Image (tube, grey):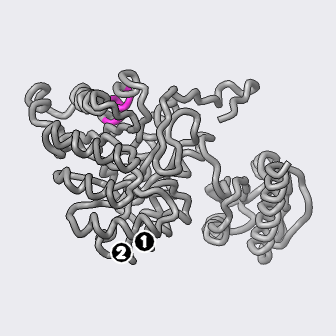
Amino acid sequence: MSLNPVRPWRNIYRRKSRQIMVGNVPVGGDAPISVQTMTNTVTTDIAGTIAQVQAAAEAGADIVRVSVPDQDSAKALKEIVRESPVPIVADIHFHYKRGIEAAEAGAACLRINPGNIGSQERVREVIKAARDHGCSMRIGVNAGSLEKHLLEKYGEPCPEAMVESGMDHIRILEDNDFHEFKISVKASDVFLAAAAYQGIAEATDKPIHLGITEAGGLMSGTIKSAVGLGNLLWMGIGDTIRVSLSADPVEEVKVGYEILKSLGLRHRGVNIISCPSCARQGFDVIKTVEALEQRLEHIKTPMSLSIIGCVVNGPGEALMTDVGFTGGGNGAGMVYLAGKASHKMTNDQMIEHIVEEVEKKAAEIDAREAAQAAE
């Protein structure tokens, strides 16, 4: 991320971590923070799982995780990997052989939970399969499935227990000369997760996968994830994120990007700045924003759009956006382009006109970037 010396209060200094590859996606180091999600289809439903992976990728997912609970799922994974436009992470629990089979099927990364994968010897066998087939790995510590001896030692899931679990398994991987891995220390409790992540960030330079596990439904889970992940990202912790929602995986991707966009860490699509509306509004702001969010979903080019109901804050917000519309009187408002007042537009034609202006601006940006890349 480029830092702006004029506005030091906006700078986020990311924790320095080593970089690994998940398929063709770099994770850690100076790579962009990647956005992940996980399919919720039955993995043996190959067509359904592939469709969900593709939908997530279209929404912007860099990496998609797929559960591999049994041998049939491991067999299905091979075709899913072949058809996927993004790297596939195989989610492994309880059965270490599934990890070996997933590596053989072409998974880009194996996610293992040290609390339930079995003995160190079994973990070593999974490591060997990952090395033989070019997989990276993720150590996935979870507060809900810590090892028995750690629960006995600490009495309950706590940050210290989670960090100790993670470091124990880091040593196993490193003792086997395996270094292509990232780590997560997830909990459903925001405070527990945040403290565990701060602890593991201080204890190791390995790339970190962030998540508030089992966060809840779309509304509550989004808020919990934004609070937990947002604070950690603000501190510079995190190389890849997954927002865990009881919702469509596409929604997880959208929320993940919105969290990153709010901190200036990733930019994708149209960032709509809009007012909550009040009696001063010159048009129906809420319905307009709802319509524009749907109509502009196809835009992947990073750009900003302000939709403000009146002239109190409208002109000021428009100064800082690529396209803007500020409500006025007599059923019309002002269109702003590149921060400057451009022309008036009637409210009844405003949505169509704004979509046209955003599409035009996106095309200009894409063309300019393509020309620069060709030089």
Q: Which residue is mark 2?
A: 46
Position above or below: 8 against 238: above
Within 10 Å of disc 1 (Cα), the crowding (few <14, some 14-19, many 20+) is many
| Three-letter code, disc 1 | Ile
Q: Could you say where residue 248 lies in the image, as x and y percent from the top left?
A: 41, 66
Q: Could you say where residue 180 lies in the image, as x and y percent from the top left?
A: 40, 38
| Three-letter code, disc 2 | Ile
Query: Is label 1 in contact with label 2 (beta carbons under 8 Å)?
Result: yes
Q: Nearer the viewer, residue 333 or 197?
A: 197
Asked whether, in this view, residue 339 is left or right of residue 3, the answer is right
Q: Nearer the viewer, residue 158 or 352?
A: 158
Asked whether, in this view, residue 351 is left or right of residue 106, the answer is right
Q: Residue at x 27, y 46 (%)?
A: 112
Q: Residue at x 66, y 72 (%)?
A: 295
Q: Is residue 185 magenta?
A: no
Asked which quadrant contains residue 291, the reply is: bottom right
Q: Could you say where residue 12 lies in the image, as x and y percent from the top left?
A: 59, 30
Q: Which residue is mark 1?
A: 50
The reply to whether residue 5 is visible in this rendering is yes
Within 10 Å of disc 2 (Cα), the crowding (few <14, some 14-19, many 20+) is some
Q: Residue at x 24, y 25 (%)?
A: 160
Q: Residue at x 25, y 31 (%)?
A: 172
Q: Which residues are magenta?
A: 193-198
The reply to whether residue 231 is visible in this rendering is no
